[in-house]
Image (cartoon, rainbow, N blue to C red):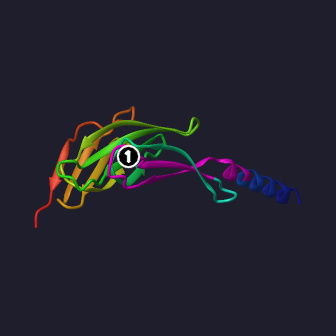
Amino acid sequence: MRIQKIVLFISFLIGTSLYSQKQFVFFGSYNWDKGSEAVYVYELDNKTGKLTKVASSSDVINPGYITVSSDGKYIYASSDAKTPNYGTVSSFAFDADKKSLTFLNQQKTGGENPAYVNVDKSGKWLINATYNQATISVFPLLENGKIDSMVQHFKFLE
């Protein structure tokens, strides 16, 4: 009986912990001009499923793909602008306690229409792939979340 009470109590603590944690959802959208919102942060209520907008940014154009650093402090977006020489990746700082999103910087990808962006497991590298020109770019990530200059660029030919 005592073990059952302990297991029940531990289950209660785990369940309470899961439902009390803040969870955030990140969205990118097409905005076509640098004056309207494009990156959004919503807080998810785990009990009701309701999403509440807590932050946004209008500092980039058409962030078609977004990824989040493993510690949740930084957001990276690829801008699919369909504009020659515009393909970029951008970084943002996200402060969960203040519910704030701050644009950090942007780097050119060396290809149009970036369609994918990801951070490697070490958190030190950002990898980007473009759609139209079949390229992959590699960028170092700085400790402050900013994207450093491209160090490698692959172009795939038919």
Q: Return the x and y of residue 91 as percentages of the image width and height.
A: 37, 41
Q: Return the x and y of residue 38 as percentages of the image width and height.
A: 41, 49
> Judging from the image, what secondary structure is the residue with disc 1 in?
strand
Residue 43: say if magenta: yes
Compare residues 31 and 97 and report the one nearer the observer.
31
Kindly identify which residue carries mark 1: 76
Would you place residue 66 above or below residue 106 in this image? below
Residue that protrudes farthest toward the bottom in the picture: 158
Quadrant including the C terminus: bottom left
Residue that protrudes farthest toward the left in the picture: 158
Compare residues 31 and 136 and report the one nearer the observer.
31
Circle 1: is it few (<14), some (14-19), or many (20+) Cα within 10 Å? many
Q: Return the x and y of residue 149 as percentages of the image width and height.
A: 23, 37
What's the magenta region? 16-44
Q: Return the x and y of residue 104 as percentages of the image width and height.
A: 37, 35
**Residue occupying the point 85% across, 56% down:** 5
Residue that protrudes farthest toward the top in the picture: 144
Compare residues 132 and 147 and report the one nearer the observer.
132
**Residue occupying the point 70% across, 57% down:** 47
| Image-based side of 90 in relation to 156, left or right | right
Which quadrant of the figure has residue 113? bottom left
Q: Identify the amino acid type marked 1.
A: Tyr
